[in-house]
Image (cartoon, rainbow, N blue to C red):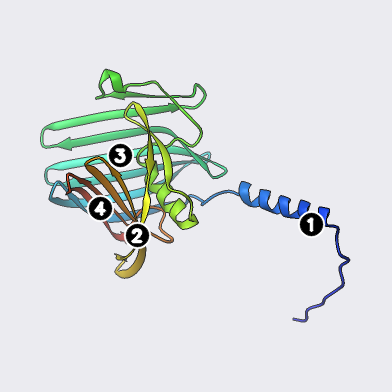
Amino acid sequence: MMSMSMHVPNKPASFRKRMLAATLLALATAPAWAVTPFSADYQASYMGLQGNGKMTLEAQGANRWKYTLSITSNVAQLSQSTVFEDRDGQWRPLSSTDRSLLLIKKVDKDANYDWSKGVATWSGDVKADRAGPVKLQKGDMDALMINLALARDVAAGKPLNYRMVEDGRAKQLSYQVAGKEAITVDGKSQQATKVVRTDGNKQTIAWVVEGLPVPARLLQKKDGKDEIDLRIKSTR
């Protein structure tokens, strides 16, 4: 293919500034990291007991998505899911469920994020002081959605600061990048970015691999001991 060049008259400085401003505005308002269907199987460790985990992202229509995390073992079953809306790259939760069965202890909770009223409320196995309402702000997410936000924002090099609205309260979360580590995904070694959040005696660590919409590994620790450890095995 032949290329052709032609002389373009110099434009005034004011014109170039307007073009630059328009370009920056287009970049700033462009849709963020796109949500796509996804499923991954995990090796799960819960309080030292081995089991299986799964994360899925499923389209629900009308720009809505359902993100589910489940863990099963011989003595425990845990399932959390969130339905959220993707409005031109801005995510906001609409509803969530939290189900767990540990030996004979059962927990069943639901959350509703009513953006028309601007409040979140909780029902089911919740204490009266954790039922809400909690006033919502733009950018609020529930705990499960933070996993998606970490994968998105690490890849984009954005600050890892979030406002989580969960269990009848709003809380600021901040993660710090703690270097790179190798992690195995689908039998292949991949470089992962390790991010850490410490809150008193609790610590959450996530390993993010480029191209994965969820962390490749999630580790929750309390008093220096592992509580929940999810390590990705395969994706599809």
Disc 2 marks which residue?
A: 235
Secondary structure at badge 3 equals strand
Q: Can you tell which quarter of the image residue 128 is in?
A: top left
- The answer for how far apart the CA atoms under marks 4 and 1 are is 51 Å
Q: Earlier in the sequence, mark 4 or mark 2?
A: 4
- Under mark 4, the amino acid is Leu
Single out the mark in the foreground, 4 or 2: 4
Q: Position of residue 197 (x, y in %)?
A: 32, 47
| Identity of the residue furthest to the top in this view | 128
- Under mark 1, the amino acid is Arg
For the residues bearing labels 3 and 4, Cβ distance under 8 angstroms = no
- The answer for how far apart the CA atoms under marks 3 and 4 are is 14 Å
- The answer for how far apart the CA atoms under marks 3 and 1 are is 51 Å
Disc 3 marks which residue?
A: 80
**Going 49% across and 24% down the picture, which residue do you hit?**
118
Q: Can you tell which quarter of the image residue 234 is in?
A: bottom left
Q: Earlier in the sequence, mark 2 or mark 1?
A: 1
Q: Earlier in the sequence, mark 4 or mark 1?
A: 1
